[in-house]
Image (spheres, coloured by chain):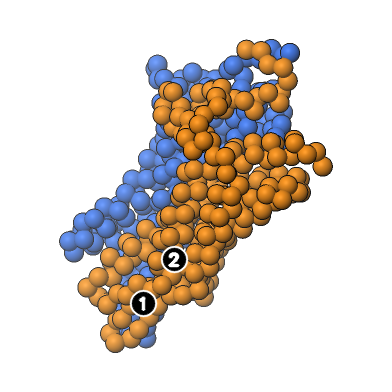
């Protein structure tokens, strides 16, 4: 018989097994993967990825996402420019999809991660812990959807390359893809145990 | 809370959405257990998990091959016909020297989905044959790592968005692969929703406990 504290149980992020939190070095009893053994470094890692993602998000919005070459005339549009153009052409649903996927989701994900990372260290007010778990879970679920714009650019670039009309991917697509990638890494690096402890 | 040994922790489950601890209770075949505080699905009971899992993964794999072997979309623009295949999307990026985006696309929409289905087939086949306990473990760990990184469904929505953008400029025809990709994505979503990784782990435990090899 061993006595364990209900609050000292954690879930292995890889195999979902329930483990006892030994706080220092946690190795999952089922799949042998290490479960964020140092909380401090997991927060730092998460911050580092997040800051990289935010930095990459700046050129993603300044440089052109898409370059259209039509009869030797070249036109390029940024993410926001593309959304505005679609809106003016009357394709409201698509403009909204792109706007949500490339602007709303990344920015709200940055804000949520910043909020989580700050609030586990300095609890603000009397926020309940269940909300934070849900918040984290939701960012994990909706995060990848911001890749839509990158895929759309890839599809258009592959589809349209005639001699007189050509669509090329722009510099922003690399920056944007990297930004999404690092945001995902940042969310993965975040240690859910911290939410429990701060509550 | 008292338990006999660490192994008994397998009777417990932590909700992935709200992190509440639950004790697993036996449920009827074909039903599922939901979290009492947030309603998320915790686990399912499927007596024929191996057979269902194996047949679903093989079907999905076949549709993945279909989705990769024919054109996804054909368009007619200024009298020229153009088409894309799944692999052409990232090959074109490589040709235009967008190596980073190309690599990401290669992994997110091709390699990871492919690996997930191949691993599923191998895992269920090995469990069915009751052999290679360690290999099943390694594959399950790998599966746990790559599962969050598969983005077929997002790619499918992206195709639709790209096509709506082209309406008015070009004549659009859906290719055979497009339908293949839709079915593949549906199967992928169905597997993710109905077979949780922890259920396969528990299945592995039960199978190899009976006949220690």
Q: Is residue B20 left or right of residue B182?
A: right
Return the chain for callout 2: B
What color does chain A have in the rendering?
blue
Quickly name the residue at label 1: B74
Nearer the observer, A23 or B18: B18
Q: In this view, does A109 lie above or below A155?
A: above
Picture coordinates of residue A41 (x, y %)? 63, 33
Number of other residues with Cα within 10 Å of mark 1, as a class: few under 14, some 14 to 19, many 20 or more: some
Residue at 49 percent of width and 43 percent of height: B194
Q: Is residue A5 above or below residue B209?
A: above
Picture coordinates of residue A63 (x, y %)? 39, 61
Kindly indicate which chain is depicted in orange in the rendered structure. Answer: B
Toward the right, the furthest residue is B213
Q: Do labels 1 and 2 share a chain?
A: yes
Residue B133, quarter of picture: top right
Nearer the observer, B43 or A88: B43
Q: In this view, does A123 lie to the left or right of A74?
A: right
Quickly name the residue at label 2: B180
Picture coordinates of residue A98 (x, y %)? 32, 55
Residue at 28 percent of width and 65 percent of height: B164
Q: What element carries label 1?
A: strand
Nearest to N terminus: mark 1 or mark 2? 1
Residue at 66 percent of width and 44 percent of height: B141
In three-dimensional space, the C-alpha distance between marks 1 and 2, rounded to whole angstroms, equals 15 Å
Q: Is residue B2 above or below residue B133?
A: above
Residue A107, quarter of picture: top left
Return the chain for callout 1: B
Q: The N terminus of chain A lies in which quarter of the figure?
A: top right
Picture coordinates of residue B187 (x, y %)? 47, 54
Nearer the observer, A23 or A81: A23
């Amino acid at each position: 018989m061993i006595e364990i504290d209900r609050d000292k149980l954690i879930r292995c992020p890889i195999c979902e097994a329930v483990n006892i939190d030994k706080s220092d070095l946690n190795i999952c009893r089922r799949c042998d993967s290490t479960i964020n053994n140092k909380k401090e470094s997991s927060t730092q890692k998460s911050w580092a990825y997040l800051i990289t993602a935010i930095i990459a998000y700046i050129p993603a919005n300044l440089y052109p996402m898409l370059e259209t070459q039509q009869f030797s005339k070249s036109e390029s549009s940024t993410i926001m420019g593309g959304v505005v153009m679609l809106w003016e052409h009357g394709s409201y649903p698509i403009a909204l999809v792109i706007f949500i996927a490339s602007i709303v989701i990344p920015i709200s994900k940055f804000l949520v991660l910043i909020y989580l990372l700050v609030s586990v260290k300095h609890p603000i007010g009397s926020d309940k812990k269940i909300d934070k778990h849900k918040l984290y879970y939701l960012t994990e679920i909706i995060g990848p959807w911001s890749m839509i714009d990158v895929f759309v650019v890839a599809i258009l670039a592959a589809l349209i390359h005639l001699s007189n009309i050509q669509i090329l991917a722009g510099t922003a697509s690399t920056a944007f893809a990297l930004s999404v990638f690092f945001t995902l890494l940042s969310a993965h690096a975040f240690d859910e145990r911290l939410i429990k402890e701060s509550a | 809370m008292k338990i006999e040994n660490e192994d008994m922790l397998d009777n417990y489950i932590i909700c992935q959405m709200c992190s509440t601890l639950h004790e697993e209770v036996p449920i009827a075949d074909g039903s599922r257990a939901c979290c009492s505080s947030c309603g998320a699905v915790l686990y399912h009971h499927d007596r024929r998990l191996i057979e269902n899992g194996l047949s679903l993964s093989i079907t999905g794999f076949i549709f993945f091959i279909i989705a990769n072997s024919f054109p996804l979309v054909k368009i007619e623009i200024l009298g020229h016909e153009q088409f894309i295949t799944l692999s052409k999307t990232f090959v074109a990026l490589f040709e235009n020297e967008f190596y980073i985006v190309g690599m990401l696309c290669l992994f997110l929409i091709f390699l990871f989905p492919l690996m997930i289905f191949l691993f599923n087939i191998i895992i269920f086949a090995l469990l069915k044959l009751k052999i290679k306990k360690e290999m099943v473990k390694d594959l399950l760990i790998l599966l746990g790592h790559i599962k969050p990184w598969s983005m077929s469904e997002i790619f499918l929505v992206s195709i639709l968005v790209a096509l709506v953008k082209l309406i008015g400029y070009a004549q659009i025809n859906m290719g055979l692969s497009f339908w293949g990709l839709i079915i593949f994505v549906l199967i992928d979503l169905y597997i993710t929703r109905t077979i949780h990784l922890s259920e396969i782990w528990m299945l592995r435990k039960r199978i190899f406990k009976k006949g220690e090899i």
